[in-house]
Image (spheres, grey):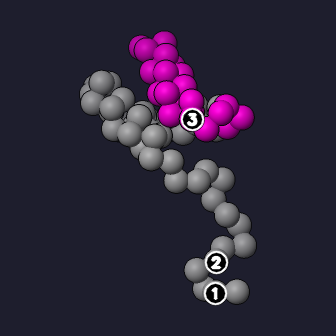
Amino acid sequence: MSDSASPHPSPEPPDDGVGQAVDRLVREFAGRPPATVTAVVRGARTELSGAPAGALPELVERLARQRLRAAG
């Protein structure tokens, strides 16, 4: 086993679609701290983990946007 191998893989694999959603939503919700937007997007990603991979980026962004709007 190499030093770079982790016995505990991260719970979320890197996901470019989610990163792009964070970037767009940080701009759209400029009055919110970026860390808050990121947390909402990650939460949406976790909740939608069973969604088809091809639809995931759009679904995550829509759910996160809805939650950010609802939070005011």
Amino acid identity at mark 2: Ala
Amino acid identity at mark 3: Gly
Q: Are marks 2 and 1 in contact (CB under 8 Å)?
A: yes
Looking at marks 1 and 3 on the same chain, the residue that comes earlier in the sequence is marked by 1
User: Is residue 61 at all visible to an observer of this figure?
Assistant: yes
Q: Position of residue 4 (x, y in %)?
A: 58, 80
User: Is residue 47 at all visible to an observer of this figure?
Assistant: no
Find disc 3 in the rendering and name its residue: 54
Residue at the extreme bottom of the image, as rendered: 2
Span of residues in magenta = 49-72
Q: Position of residue 47 (x, y in %)?
A: 66, 32
| Kind of element beneath mark 1 | loop
Q: Position of residue 10 (x, y in %)?
A: 63, 59
Q: Is residue 10 above or below residue 40?
A: below
Q: Is residue 68 located in the magenta-colored stretch of the structure?
A: yes
Which label lies toward us, 1 or 3?
3
Find disc 1 in the rendering and name its residue: 2
Find disc 2 in the rendering and name its residue: 5
As drawn, is 17 to the left or to the right of 25?
Answer: right
Amino acid identity at mark 1: Ser
Q: Picture quarter containing residue 26?
A: top left
Write the residue at 33% across / 38% down. 23
| Kind of element beneath mark 2 | loop
Image quadrant in which the N terminus is located: bottom right
Q: Position of residue 53 (x, y in %)?
A: 61, 38
Q: Is residue 58 above or below residue 49?
A: above
Write the residue at 49% across / 21% down. 62
Which label lies toward us, 3 or 2?
3
